[in-house]
Every structure is written in C-alpha cells, then in structure tokens.
Amino acid sequence: MFRGFLRNKCPWVRITVVGREEGAVEAIVDTGFNGYLTLPEEIAKRIGLTFTGSINSGTIADGSTSASSVYIGKVICDNSRTDILVDVQPNCKILLGTALLEELGLSLFVDIVANRVELNPSSRVNRP
C-alpha cells in the first residue's frame, strides 16, 4: 500500500520522476486524465526528460483543447519503476493519470471523510 494525501478534497501523491536527474513531485491523481503524467516545462527540463519530437492534442475538462510536448521519462512510485510518456506544457498542474495507475497495477482508494488516500496493488493484476 502506498499512501497519498488530500488537499482541497483532491487526492495527491508524491512520486519521483527520472530523466538525467531525479526529482520528487506532488501530483494530483486525476481520474479524468487517461494519460500517464503531465508536468510543467520547467520541471521536465530541470529533470532532463527526453523530448520525443511529438506534440499531443487533448481535450480537457472544460471542453477546450490543449497541446502538449511529449517527453520520455521514468516514474518511481512506491518502489515500482516504469518508463512512461510525459505530457509537458509551459504552465500546468502536475497530474497523474489513469494510464500510469494501470501501468503500475494500482487501484485508488479515497476516503474524503477520513482524509485518506491509498494506492494499492490491484487484485486484477498478475504481478511477478
């Protein structure tokens, strides 16, 4: 089990993002984001993520579209490490998406009343 925390009734977790350097970040767990991770450009460059040369366009919650540069990096979350695609924008919130939860085989539990956030290994994933 990996614990997160609530801030303004939103689930957050601390993860480590790895490029040429490592950097710990706090990310909002966004169940409406079906990607892996979104980072501000400043953090992506400081950590030294690798630009793929691709640009993604996606629809955000308010219905507008947003363009992101696509980078490659690694993420460490509760001793699990995986390569991921990172959407990078000049100024954005750090979002952890459902693709990353799936890649890591994690289920999300949020209890607003008890102020508790947990990421647990999913019972539906066969892990070695």
Image: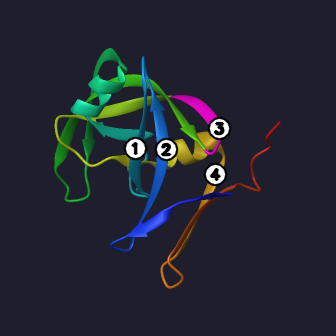
Query: Quick one: quadrant of the N terminus?
Result: bottom right
* Relative image position of residue 97 (x, y in whole percent): 44, 48
What's the mark number on residue 62? none
Query: Quick one: quadrant of the C terminus?
Result: top right
Residue 26, magenta (yes or no) = no
Q: Which residues are magenta?
A: 78-83
Which residue carries the number 4 mark?
A: 106
- Indicate the quadrant where residue 58 lies: top left
Helix, strand or loop at label 1? It is strand
Type of the residue with mark 1: Val
Helix, strand or loop at label 4? It is strand
Type of the residue with mark 3: Ser
Pick whichever of labels 4 and 3 is earlier in the sequence: 3
- Indicate the quadrant where residue 108 lies: bottom right
> Rounded to the nearest whole Å, what is the CA distance between mark 2 and mark 1?
6 Å
Residue found at the far bottom of this picture: 113
What's the mark number on residue 80? 3
Which residue carries the number 1 mark?
A: 25
> Rounded to the nearest whole Å, what is the CA distance between mark 4 and mark 3?
10 Å
Residue 35 higher or lower than 2, as above or below:
above
Helix, strand or loop at label 3? It is strand
Q: Residue at x 34, y 40 (%)?
A: 38
Type of the residue with mark 2: Ile
Q: How many marks?
A: 4
> Rounded to the nearest whole Å, what is the CA distance between mark 4 and mark 1?
18 Å
Which residue carries the number 2 mark?
A: 15
* Relative image position of residue 124 (x, y in whole percent): 75, 53
* Relative image position of residue 106 (x, y in whole percent): 64, 51
Q: Is residue 43 left or right of residue 85?
A: left
- Of the residues tagged 4 and 3, which is closer to the observer? 3
Pick whichever of labels 2 and 1 is earlier in the sequence: 2
